[in-house]
Structure formats: C-alpha cells, structure tokens
Image: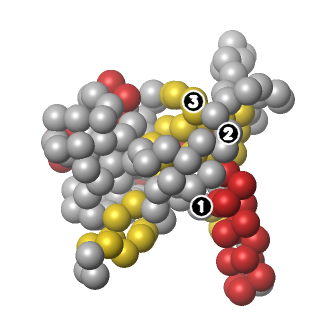
Amino acid sequence: MGKEAESGTELLPVQRKTRTEIAGFCQRLGRLTGRSFRLPTEAEWEYAARGGRYSKGYLYSGSDDWADVAWMNLTSGGEMHPVGTKLPNELGIYDMSGNAWELCSDLYGPYSPASVSNPQGAGNGAYAVVRGGGIFGGTNSCRVTYRSFDAPDSNLVINGFRIVMDK
C-alpha cells in the first residue's frame, strides 16, 4: 500500500487517488527507475493477500482473527491508521485486510465457473474491482475472498492502492 506522510511522522495509506492519477504516478515512477509499475490484477492482489506460496489459509490477510490484522469499523474509530501497525501476512505485507480499500486493474464482473490459473478480469464493465475492506467495513469485507467495486475514477477517502513492479 502506498504511504503518505501526515502530521510529520505517521505514514498513512495514500488515498483519494483515481485510477488515472495512479497510472500517471506509475508512469513517472517508471521513468525515474527504468522499471514498469501498475496496479495489480484482482488475482495478483488475492494471491498476495493470502500469503502467496506461504499461505496458511487464513480468513484475513495474516490471521484468522480480524483484530490482529484489520483496521475496520470495530477497530478504526472511522479513521485511517499508520501503515504497519497491525500484523503482516505470511509474505510480510501489511494492511491487506482493512484500513483502505485497494484498487485493482480489473473491471468488476462475475468469476468464470471454470477453474482458471491467474484469471483475467472482466473484458468490459462499468466498475473497477476494489479489495481488502476498509475503515468503515465489517469483518466480512476484510476477508481475503471478499470482492467489491467502485467507479473506475472514484477518489473516495476510503480507496487506496498498492502497486506491482514488473520484472
């Protein structure tokens, strides 16, 4: 998840960014580093949230107990919290359950009934996928399997993002 300084020392999730702004940030970062950056697909996001090949099958990213890993309606007080103040998942990634919803590159649509490895998102649709739950969500929306959606260029305060660096 991106980090944004607030009140000098706290690093909060970057929020209120549209997919267009995120794409511009990824392009600028790419020019500075010579690498390629982008939003993750929904499948990539879920694989990382589950702990990748080290997954222990938790309900939430890093634990079966939401209180260990998620800033959400029962724990957040309606405010974003500094990144990394709850436990990480098996890959050492923080805040994939709760704090800010995370935009994915995929458009929202139904899952294919067939078993698929690394599925691609819907070919068309009016909404973008968001994952991870947020500060106003409940325990269900913070589960690694929960899917939701938002307008593609929404800049809601509860929407954040993390990026993928391609090889």
Which residue position is annotated with label 3? 149
- Tag 3's secondary structure? strand
Of 44 and 1, nearer the camera is 1
Which percent across, then down, holds residue 164? 63, 61
Which percent across, then down, holds residue 43? 62, 39
- Tag 2's secondary structure? loop
Residue 18 lies left or right of residue 148; in this view the side is right
Which percent across, then down, holds residue 66? 22, 38
Q: Residues within 10 Å of mark 2 (few under 14, many from 20)?
A: many
Q: Nearer the viewer, mark 2 or mark 1?
A: 2
Q: Is residue 151 visible?
A: yes
Q: Residues within 10 Å of mark 1 (few under 14, many from 20)?
A: many
Q: Quadrant of residue 90?
A: bottom left
Of 84 and 51, nearer the camera is 84
Looking at the image, is mark 2 or mark 1 earlier in the sequence? Answer: 2
| Contact check, label 2 and label 1, Cβ < 8 Å | no
Which percent across, then down, holds residue 108? 67, 28
Residue type indicated by callout 2: Pro
Which residue position is annotated with label 1? 163
Q: Is residue 133 above or below residue 122?
A: below
Residue type indicated by callout 1: Ile
At x 67% / y 17%, what residue is drawn? 110
